[in-house]
Image: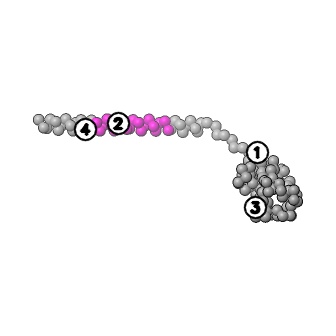
Amino acid sequence: MKNKYAIGFIVLSVTAILIITCAYQLSYYRAKERAQEARIKTEKEPAMEPEETIPTEGGALKEDCYYLMEVNGYIVVYLSDKKTPYEYTDILFDELPEKLREEIRNGKYIEDTKALYGFLENYSS
């Protein structure tokens, strides 16, 4: 009688293991198919075109503005976030007119690249 129960228990265990293995394989293949479909979908979508950039050290975008600030006695150009340096200049802060120095202390706003380079040309040595 014990052998009948032992054989039944073994058959039941093997059957349970097979069912669990099949369920795992099925879920694995379904997840793999969904991931592949998602990858194909993203490949088919058109990539967004990047905005036109100006080739500079800071990587400013066309629409960015600039701020002039004084650092260690020199004028430094920052991007619109006032944290990312765009260009370091050799313009001495002390050699600028008093009104301009006051504007630069507060972070002088420059609207576009043309105005920025106009300013830099005027005050460079």
- Of discs 1 and 2, which sits in the foreground? 1
Horizontal placement of 123 versus 41: left or right? right
Cβ–Cβ below 8 Å for labels 3 and 4? Answer: no
Quarter holding the N terminus? top left
Is residue 120 in view? no
- Residue 77, horizontal then vertical, whole percent: 77, 56
Marks 3 and 2, the one that precedes in the sequence:
2
Cα distance in 3D space between marks 3 and 2: 67 Å
Tag 3 residue: 71
The residue segment tinted magenta is: 16-35
Tag 1 residue: 63
Amino acid type at circle 3 is Val
x 50%, y 38%: residue: 36
- Of discs 3 and 1, which sits in the foreground? 3
x 28%, y 36%: residue: 16
x 84%, y 64%: residue: 94
Amino acid type at circle 4 is Ser
Horizontal placement of 13 versus 41: left or right? left
Marks 4 and 1, the one that precedes in the sequence:
4
Cα distance in 3D space between marks 2 and 4: 14 Å
